[in-house]
Image (cartoon, rainbow, N blue to C red):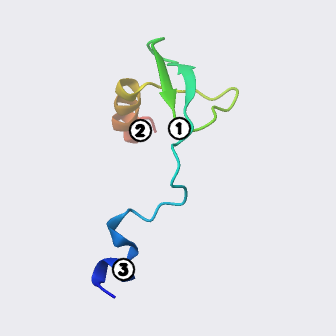
């Protein structure tokens, strides 16, 4: 038994080895069609990658 055999063989050891389910959404900021790896909740904004990065950077300056 080698190192890779003991520790998952370098395969990542994720919870689900199948493809991740993606959901089609429209960005709440720019209106661009995009996909997210989670089911959006009604009443919560969903952002494309670019807008998400903008909001993530602004998170500390709101309060």
SS label for mark 3? helix
SS label for mark 2? helix
45 versus 9 height, above or below: above
Report, in whole angstroms, how far the alpha carbon at label 1 lies from the one at label 2: 21 Å
The residue pinned by badge 1 equals 37
Furthest toward the right, the residue is 42
Q: Residues within 10 Å of mark 3 (few under 14, many from 20)?
A: few
Nearer the observer, 18 or 59: 18
50 versus 20 height, above or below: above
Image coords of residue 52 (percent x, y)? 41, 30
Q: Of circles 1 and 2, which is in front?
A: 1
Residues at discs 1 and 2 in contact (Cβ within 8 Å)? no
Q: Residues within 10 Å of mark 1 (few under 14, many from 20)?
A: few
Say which label, 1 or 2, has the lower sequence index: 1
Report, in whole angstroms, how far the alpha carbon at label 3 lies from the one at label 2: 42 Å
Q: Of circles 1 and 3, which is in front?
A: 3
The residue pinned by badge 2 equals 59
Furthest toward the top, the residue is 31
Numbered badge on residue 5: 3
């Amino acid at each position: 038994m080698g190192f890779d055999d003991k520790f998952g063989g370098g395969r990542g050891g994720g919870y689900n080895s199948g493809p991740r389910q993606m959901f089609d959404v429209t960005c709440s900021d720019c209106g661009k069609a995009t996909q997210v790896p989670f089911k959006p909740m009604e009443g919560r904004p969903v952002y494309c990658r670019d807008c998400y990065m903008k909001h993530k950077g602004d998170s500390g300056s709101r309060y």
